[in-house]
Amino acid sequence: MGDPERIGVYGGTFDPIHRTHLDVARAAMQHAGLDRVIYVVAGTPPHKRRRVNASAEDRFAMVKAALAAEPAMEVSRIEVDREGPSYTVDTLRQLQAEHPGARLYLIVGSDSLADLPGWRDPEGIVTLARLLVVPRPGARPVVPPPLEGHVDIVPFAQSDTSSTWVRRNLGQRGWASELPDAVQDIIRAKGLYDEDP
């Protein structure tokens, strides 16, 4: 038998997905020797219920378009199709059931790492997946005590690009160089982010 498949799980609202999201996945793949990365588009994220701008279907379509030229990356509908708020631990359980024997690695930013002990069933999360933490500007990774021994810090050239910043540029200028062309095409076709965030 060969080594188990190593799968990165990269969740987020992706509102919209931009080039730094792709760079994060590439860095995680290289650091942890991942075979592939599954992007999980949040349907109804518990912590952002009133702050998501594009619909789950539109965000899923943008991620799918952005990954079309990335053979080792794919997008999942798990949380888009799930009714009600989605919790990371439930998503990891479902992915583990869909990929028996695989090793899961949860890709998160250093800002999320600080919040993770307050998520639903953090012990279950670290039982199901090792954490790959990507530093964010101004947020030096500090591993909370309950997560010690379950975290790898991914070397990454920090970027100030955020979805909020991209939306602001779209609202003001109608375009943003940080977006893959296919994503920009969907935004224009659907008239997304026409107003400032």
Image (spheres, rainbow, N blue to C red):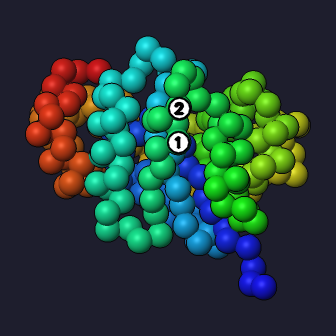
Q: What residue lies at 80% left-to-right and 45% top-to-bottom? A: 126
Residue to which mark 2 is pinned: 82
Query: In the rendered image of this protein, does residue 168 appear above or below residue 162?
Result: above
Circle 1: residue type: Ile
Q: What residue lies at 42% left-to-right and 19% top-to-bottom? A: 51
Q: Quadrant of residue 165?
A: top left
Q: Which class describes the residues within 10 Å of circle 1: few (<14), some (14-19), or many (20+)?
A: some
- For residue 135, say whether it is visible: no
Q: Quadrant of residue 93?
A: top right
Query: In the rendered image of this protein, does residue 29 appear above or below residue 90?
Result: below
Front residue of 55 and 109: 55
Which label is found at residue 176? none
Q: Secondary structure at mark 2?
A: loop
Front residue of 110 and 18: 18
Q: Mark 2 and 1 residues: CB-CB less than 8 Å, in contact? A: yes
Quarter containing the C terminus: top left
Asked if residue 84 lies left or right of residue 182, the reply is right
Q: What residue lies at 21% left-to-right and 54% top-to-bottom? A: 182
Front residue of 140 and 117: 117
Residue to which mark 1 is pinned: 78
Front residue of 38 and 179: 38
Asked if residue 193 lies left or right of residue 118, the reply is left
- Cα separation, mark 2 vs mark 1, equals 6 Å
Q: What residue lies at 79% left-to-right and 34% top-to-bottom? A: 122
Query: In the rendered image of this protein, does residue 171 appear above or below residue 189?
Result: above
Asked if residue 70 lies left or right of residue 94, the reply is left
Residue 82, given in percent of the width and then of the height, sits at 53, 32
